[in-house]
Image (spheres, rainbow, N blue to C red):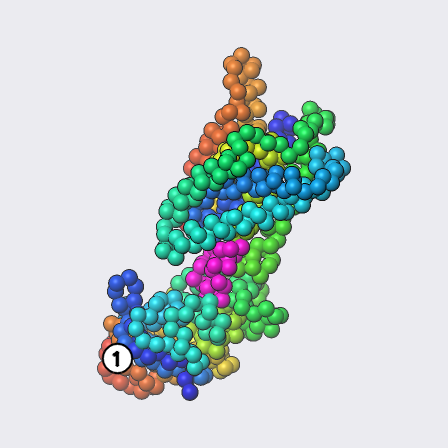
Amino acid sequence: MNILTVEGVTAGYGDMDVIFDITAEIEPDDLVAVIGPNGAGKSTLLKTIVGAVRARKGEIEFKEQDVTNWAIDRIVKRGLSWVPQDDHIFPTLTVEENLDVGAYTYFGDYSDRIERVWSFFPQLKSRMKQVAGDLSGGQQQMVAVGRGLMTEPDLLLLDEPTAGLAPNLIKMMHEKIGEINKSGVTVLLVAQSLETFRASNRGYLLTSGEIKYSGDTEDLLDNPEVRDLYFGG
Amino acid sequence: MIGPLVNGIILGSIITLGAIGVTLVADILNFFNFAHGAIFTLGAYFTYLYLNILPDMGSMFSLSFGGSMLIAIILSMVSTSLVVLFFDKIIFRTLRRRDASSLFLALTSLGLVFVMKATISMIWGPQVHYYGPIQSAIKFPLGIRVKPDEFFIVAASLILVLVAYLFLKYTRLGKAMRATSDNVVLAQASGVGTERIVTWTWIMSASLAALGGTLYGLEVQIRPTMGWSFLIPMFVAVIVGGVGSFGGALAGGMIIGISEELITSLLQDLFLKLDIRVVMSAYKPAIAFVLIIFVLLVRPHGIFGRKGG
């Protein structure tokens, strides 16, 4: 049974459609990557799933409920968390406050959730009182993912989580995403690089707003057309 | 020098109460609320209304008022918040849903000023009112003269500013409000409902304005235009301190209050020595504008504001 089903979704901005008739399925505990060239509609797909962009056509089902065009805060309460590519932290809040806001939907004691974030990103613990906007790009990315984990999501959407990071941080982030996935969180991420794509189990290749190929990561990497289209042969 | 400084602190503490409301709305709702002065006035009149309805409870300590005033202030804060929420529901929420620009929202608030001012004049008349008898000041060394009510004004302002700060800094809702002002979409992605935040922003802003209006009424007098003349110092305090900065509103309020009093006093003395007859208190708004120009030239984002914020 799928945790997320996207069925024939078309969405865009203003009068312009950006993604067309997208159909995708994510199973529980999956680690799925969406790849494609710039402007292919990868981020728009994630935004449409979470409700930040309205779907003009089609249906999005999450945990057996139609959530098409739900308000973002409502879909988050149902167990879906989204870490956008840009503006992914609250810059004037401290690291700890960013995590506090991440747990906004939970009314009980969430110290165990914060401890879980520290266990994934121990570097953040010593900077918990520091204003997030003053952190390095890599640390901000950790805060962003940590905030996304504070809702204890069933499905985590990560939009280019390694964008702009140094190679050693990219490797670390891949490991962390793998750990998060192994801890029982289904992950759907937008992959910018071959390395990030390799970290996933399955993938969708998006070009010009349409899904061109989908399948297991290894199969897609073995497909010469996919390699030509996206990874340059 | 000390006397005007004390007066400046009293004035600054009232400006700060108003400025915090202006900066909250500017930061979270993303527009400069010109109606904030009218809300300030409405708060003063609501207190006057409740003070006349409630039984007289005598006076406390050396103050000109007693328990009935404190109850009237609380009722005024609640009533003012309800009126402001009503305006939000029928006007501003509709405009937000239509993605109205910040400029349009600000202009709408300017229109609301005239509606509120006219309504207040119709209900309470254009004449001035007082909460009670005019107090005589206590004399202190160095020529300082302070009325007992003025101690209450400063103390009440500081307590409310502290409460507002602690609320924003440490409560779940306060952090959500700050998060929303940082990034609305990301706050929503954390499960924060924007409309709830908007409601609490109005409640905080209106409550502080109602208290500010009452304290100003206590210090001077109640009249339909009192908030309008106070709007410039409140806006200047926010811009000088940095839009969206709580500390900036506090510092900006005090800077405006103290510099208005100090500079007018110094210039008044100077003109007297030069035998030039000028009533400098009439030029207080000019001092505020000079300050704003100076600060914006040196720090365009205000003293505590962030670049681009």
Residue that badge 1 annotates? A212
Depth check, front residue: B108 or A135: B108
* As drawn, A134 above or below B288: below
Does any portion of residue A161 appear in the rendered image?
A: no
Depth check, front residue: A178 or A85: A85
* As drawn, B133 above or below B92: above
**Furthest residue in direction top, as rendered:** B275
Q: Residue at x 38, y 73 (%)?
A: A68
**Which x, y percent locates residue B58?**
74, 38
> Three-letter amino acid code at disc 1?
Lys
| B17 in magenta | no
Does any portion of residue B222 appear in the rendered image?
A: yes
The image quarter in which residue B57 lies? top right
Depth check, front residue: B299 or A84: A84
* As drawn, B2 above or below A50: above
* As drawn, A14 above or below B2: below
* Relative side of A10 to A84, left or right: left
* Relative side of A231 to B78, left or right: left
Q: Residue at x 55, y 49 (%)?
A: B81
User: Taken as a whole, is the magenta stretch helix, strand or loop?
Assistant: helix
* Residues rendered magenta in the picture: B177-200
**Which x, y percent locates residue A99?**
54, 66
Q: Residue at x 24, y 77 (%)?
A: A229
**Which element is circle 1 on?**
strand
Depth check, front residue: A145 or B154: B154
